[in-house]
Image: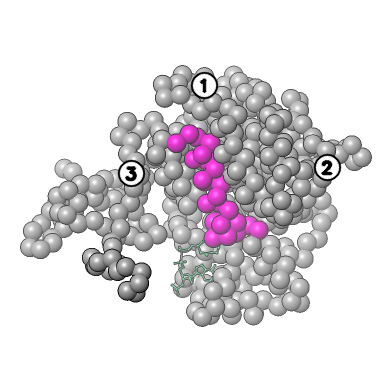
Amino acid sequence: MKEEAKLTVGGKTYKLPVITGSEGERAIDISKLRKETGLVTLDPGFVNTANCRSNITFVDGEKGILRYRGIPVEQLAEHSSFVETAYLLINGKLPTQKQLNRFSILLNDNSLVHEDMRAFFQNFPRAAHPMGILSSMVNALRAFYPEIPERSDEEEVDITMTRLLSKVRTMAAMSYKIFKGHSLVYPRADFSYPANFLNMMFDSPVKPYTIDEDLVKALNVFWILHADHEQNCSTASVRLVGSARVNLYAAISAGICALWGPLHGGANQAVVQMLNDIHEGGGKLTPFIARAKDKNDPFRLMGFGHRVYKTFDPRGLVMKKICDRVLKKLALEDPLLDIAQRLEEVAIKDEYFVDHDLYPNIDFYSGILLRAMGIPVPMFTVMFAIGRLPGWISQWKESMDNPKWKLERPRQIYIGEKKKDYVPIAER
Ligand code: ACO
């Protein structure tokens, strides 16, 4: 028998269907509520609102579980590559060797950026943030390349998606080179996706870059861990903007803007800045912990807390291990890593953090890893954006392919003034 919830309002009782997801998550379907009762629901921040049914990513925030298409992220981090994981997210299943080869060839064939786009880059002010540049450039891609036609065949869809995956990586490296005032390094057919990125970032005519397979592995893991996270702020933005049937590039550009915020993807940059402030203040943790707990101080411990995870972020646990491995391999001693470890130890035992279910999230250690790899701080959130692309693309595709697709348009509860008459300016 189908489960139902009952809602009694104004003496009348309404039945609402209860739906269950494949991992046992239950939800009350209120899609007909307004039609039947005249009422809407109010849920600021969408804390209790599921926006869609999705078969891409499963998160259990209480148990610290994250799976892409059913596969635990820890297994993907151990055995997969970012390109294979991107294929999995976008196409719904792991590729055969032949499918993976074809996907890699498409990524390669589409890796160059139209030379005219260089002019865009060169005209941005030097101080422009790379996330602002990236979102503008992705939006501009629509002017250079066609969007996916309404009734497109699979081949066209694949080309558009791989074009985006490949070009965003090239543009990210390009923006760094232009920022430095150095000559551009083009992608190479003989390098893997992450190796190509590192080469485009760091190769120079005066100092040729040698690919280090351990760093390539670390970057693969970094991007796999960021590849999707169901309906987070940026993904929800991609779906919402995409629901107006705008082109893929514009929808992704909106996602990049959302990710830029320090409460979301921008936290990786904010964490390193915070750790640096602690370091410069002599390494004392107490004042920072005290500020984070002070209700009258807007300061938050960056890299702590998550809307969904009420325990350790499983991505953070993998990230910490990779971080340790890379620092050891490069024989680097980063004082910020030491501060991060001490901060984690103190915070997870502190009553305030325990009571508020605040644990380190993925961004707590990712900045330290990126620093060790030589990625400049303003590029941190761009690194996250490259990783999140397969997720955004697959979520956009899922919503576009949904025959029950709807324009996303929330309601509100108006609390402004009641009707009043216009007063001519001379009488005000
Ligand atoms: N430091 C101190 N207190 C915190 C923190 C923090 N990092 N995070 C939440 N809190 C407290 C709030 O002050 C609030 O306390 P109160 O109930 O006593 O008023 C309570 O915990 C709940 O906070 P909300 O902001 O309502 O929780 P929400 O789920 O909306 O926030 C968020 C989640 C935005 C991630 C928050 O924890 C935060 O700001 N963290 C720091 C930024 C960060 O690391 N962001 C990265 C998230 S991961 C990602 O996007 C990839």
Is 160 rendered above or below residue 263?
above
Front of the two marks 3 and 1: 1
What residue do we see at 71% from left, 71% from top?
Answer: 277
Q: Return the residue found at the far right.
A: 206
Q: Overall secondary structure of the magenta stretch?
A: helix
Residue at the location (16% across, 58% down)? 7
Q: Do the residues labelled 2 and 1 touch (CB within 8 Å)?
A: no
Q: Which of labels 2 and 1 is toward the front?
A: 2
Tag 1 or tag 3, which sits nearer the N-term? 3
Quadrant that contains the N terminus:
top left
Q: Are marks 3 and 1 in contact (CB under 8 Å)?
A: no
Above-or-below relation of 413 to 134? below
Magenta region: which residues? 246-269
Label 1 neighbour load within 10 Å: few <14, some 14-19, many 20+: some
The residue indicated by pointer 3 is 21
Mark 2 and mark 1 lie on one chain; the one further toward the N terminus is 1
Residue type, mark 1 in image: Glu
